[in-house]
Amino acid sequence: MAEDFSGKIVVVTGAASGIGLEQVKLFLENNAVVIGIDKNAVPLINDNLVTIIGDVTGTLVFEKLTKLLENSFKKIDIVCNTAGVLDDYRPVMDTSIEQWNDTIQTDLTSQFLLIKATLPLMLKQKHGVFVNMASIAGLVAGGGGVAYTAAKHAVIGMTKQLDIDYAARGIRANCIAPGAIDTPMNAADFAGDGKMAKWVADQTPAKRWAKPEEVAELTLFLASSRADYIHGSVIPIDGGWTAK
């Protein structure tokens, strides 16, 4: 039985689609108040859902969030740093400085900015949980191009350091490392005859892609009190990919 998140305030980035949208849905189903952040409209209507439309590569969206938390909620319990972009598996020689900067800004710096925006309130209330989105590309090579792999490795390091620095003050930080998840972000793998998607499934020991709902379920557990002793960890959800 899932934990009741009544009275909890949850922030989710990348809330309009894929894993982020499923996280929003699941937290709402379990009675949390959710603040969904995305550059696109979140396709949900719920009395417990507040949305902020904005790009996580800039600072304005986080300034809006800070004002919202200070003026309306006075607290923040859970942060899901989920927004991200792929880099088309490009190696160094095919990666422009513009793509490098955009990937790092979206996949890494946006998480840092959201942590900076919410951590002071968590420290004041002496409790808070971060669930940051890494990837199998943060654990092994081959899960992305050079920019994506670098960003996701850095997310794992940042998460561990965040937890070490603030665990004694009531903060928990962990990250999830998904493998092949069937989301709009991975739509290119299913294009045409779906040859790439079939290859990925074949290379995955579980022989399938996961649904974003499965990642949301793991998020819910890591955010719950049942995971209170899980600190600075990376939890793969990859069908056995990194076990090979």
Image (cartoon, grey):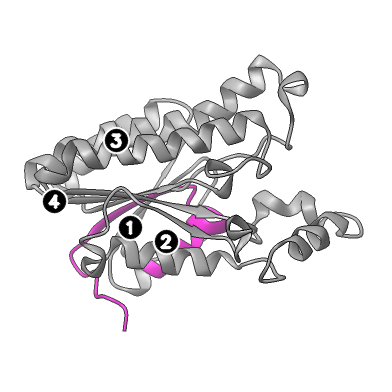
Q: Give the residue number, with chain letter if any, for mark 2.
A: 24
Stretch in magenta: 1-27
User: Residue 212 at x, y = what percent?
Assistant: 56, 64
Instruction: Look at label 2 and name its amino acid.
Output: Val
Q: Marks 1 and 2: in contact by CB < 8 Å? A: yes
Q: Is residue 240 left or right of residue 230?
A: right
Q: Nearer the viewer, residue 239 or 39?
A: 239
Q: Give the residue number, with chain letter if any, for mark 4.
A: 127
Q: Give the residue number, with chain letter if any, for mark 1.
A: 34
Between circles 4 and 2, the one closer to the viewer is 4
- Mark 3 or 1 closer to N-term? 1
Which part of the image, by quadrant, shows the N terminus?
bottom left
Q: Marks 1 and 4: in contact by CB < 8 Å? A: no
Distance (Cα) linking label 3 and label 1: 26 Å
| Numbered circle sitting on residue 161 | 3
Between circles 2 and 3, the one closer to the viewer is 3
Q: Marks 2 and 4: in contact by CB < 8 Å? A: no
- Mark 4 or 1 closer to N-term? 1
Q: Which residue appears farthest toward the bottom when viewing the image?
A: 1
Distance (Cα) linking label 2 and label 3: 26 Å
Distance (Cα) linking label 4 and label 1: 17 Å
Q: Marks 1 and 3: in contact by CB < 8 Å? A: no
